[in-house]
């Protein structure tokens, strides 16, 4: 019996490991690819949820950079 990966079609001799299921096989390379996809989706979900949380709470992070030039005392600003 020539077992092949049900996802990429590589045979047992072309890969390091072939995992058997009830009616399908998956090779180690496809498992690694699946893990990468799942990690990327989890990272995207976390980023989305963080953005949604900031939108709901109105929390925003703002970085303000100021540069003061010149000499002398600061003057009062009459308002």
Image: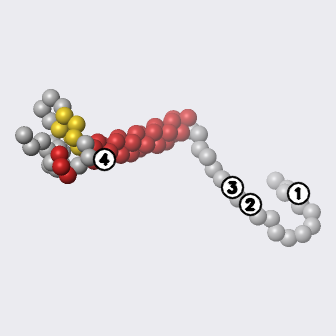
Q: CA distance from mark 1 to mark 3?
A: 22 Å
Front: mark 2 or 4: 4
Front: mark 4 or 1: 4
Q: CA distance from mark 4 to mark 3?
A: 41 Å
Residue situated in front as seen by the camera: 3 or 64: 3
Secondary structure at badge 4 equals helix
At which x and y percent is residue 70? Answer: 85, 70
At which x and y percent is residue 69? Answer: 82, 69
Q: Which mark is residue 66?
A: 2
Sequence order check, earlier mark of 4 and 1: 4
Secondary structure at badge 1 equals loop
Q: CA distance from mark 1 to mark 2?
A: 18 Å
Confirm whether residue 76 shows in the render. Answer: yes
Q: Which mark is residue 64?
A: 3
Secondary structure at badge 2 equals loop
| Residue, disc 1 | 76
Secondary structure at badge 3 equals loop
Kindly indicate the quadrant of the structure image that contains residue 25.
Answer: top left
| Residue, disc 4 | 33
Sequence order check, earlier mark of 4 and 3: 4
Please report contact status of discs 3 and 2: CB closer than 8 Å, yes or no.
yes
Q: Residues within 10 Å of mark 3 (few under 14, many from 20)?
A: few
Image-based side of 4 in relation to 53, left or right: left
Residue situated in front as seen by the camera: 76 or 16: 16
Q: Residue at x 90, y 69 (%)?
A: 71
Front: mark 1 or 2: 2
Q: CA distance from mark 3 to mark 2?
A: 7 Å
Q: Residue at x 7, y 40 (%)?
A: 1
Please report contact status of discs 1 and 3: CB closer than 8 Å, yes or no.
no
């Amino acid at each position: 019996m020539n077992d092949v990966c049900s996802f990429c079609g590589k045979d047992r001799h072309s890969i390091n490991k072939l995992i058997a299921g009830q009616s399908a096989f998956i090779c180690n390379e496809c498992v690694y690819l699946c893990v990468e996809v799942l990690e990327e989706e989890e990272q995207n979900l976390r980023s989305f949820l963080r953005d949604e949380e900031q939108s709901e709470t109105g929390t925003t992070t703002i970085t303000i950079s100021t540069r003061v030039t010149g000499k002398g005392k600061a003057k009062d600003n009459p308002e």
